[in-house]
Image (tube, rainbow, N blue to C red):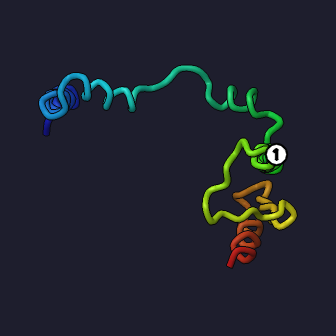
Amino acid sequence: MTLTAELNQKAKAILIRELGPVDNARFIQQYQEGTGDYTRDRHLLLSDENARTLHEQAAHLAANGELPRPTGAKQLPINDWIPLKLPTNPANSNQKSKINNHHS
């Protein structure tokens, strides 16, 4: 069995040979760990956003011609949406069965 370090070296050599150094770097960058706290930042930026507010914003943009509707798309009235109510404790099998029965 190949050691992890040897395996990584072989993989790097193959990628560079097949992709070239520039495309290899671009490929590897897709898998580099980013910085920051995505979850915290998402909540800071979108704290007041939910499906209803996003729908309202999109409808406003579409009404003003700023958001073209894709060909063949139809808009559902927001009242037609069925809110999904998840159990507060997913470990509770009784609550799980209620969800499964609701969607069957």
Residue drawn where x is 26% and y is 28% of the image: 23
Residue drawn where x is 68% and y is 79% of the image: 104
Q: Answer yes or no: is residue 3 visible.
A: no
List x then y, in percent, for residue 15.
Answer: 19, 32
Which quadrant of the view contains residue 80?
Answer: bottom right
In the displayed structure, 68 sits above or below 47; it is: below
> Which residue is more in the foreground, 51 or 68?
68
Residue drawn where x is 76% and y is 55% of the image: 89
List x then y, in percent, for residue 28.
Answer: 32, 28
| Badge 1 element | helix
Residue drawn where x is 20% and y is 26% of the image: 5
List x then y, in percent, for residue 48.
Answer: 83, 36
- The residue under label 1 is 60
Q: Residues within 10 Å of mark 1 (few under 14, many from 20)?
A: few
Q: Answer yes or no: is residue 49 visible.
A: yes
The kind of residue tagged 1 is His
The N terminus lies in quadrant: top left
Q: Is residue 73 left or right of residue 8?
A: right
> Which residue is more in the foreground, 23 or 91?
23
In the displayed structure, 22 sits above or below 92; it is: above
Q: Residue furthest right?
A: 79
> Which residue is more in the foreground, 22 or 14?
22
In the displayed structure, 101 sits above or below 95; it is: below
Which quadrant of the view contains residue 74?
Answer: bottom right
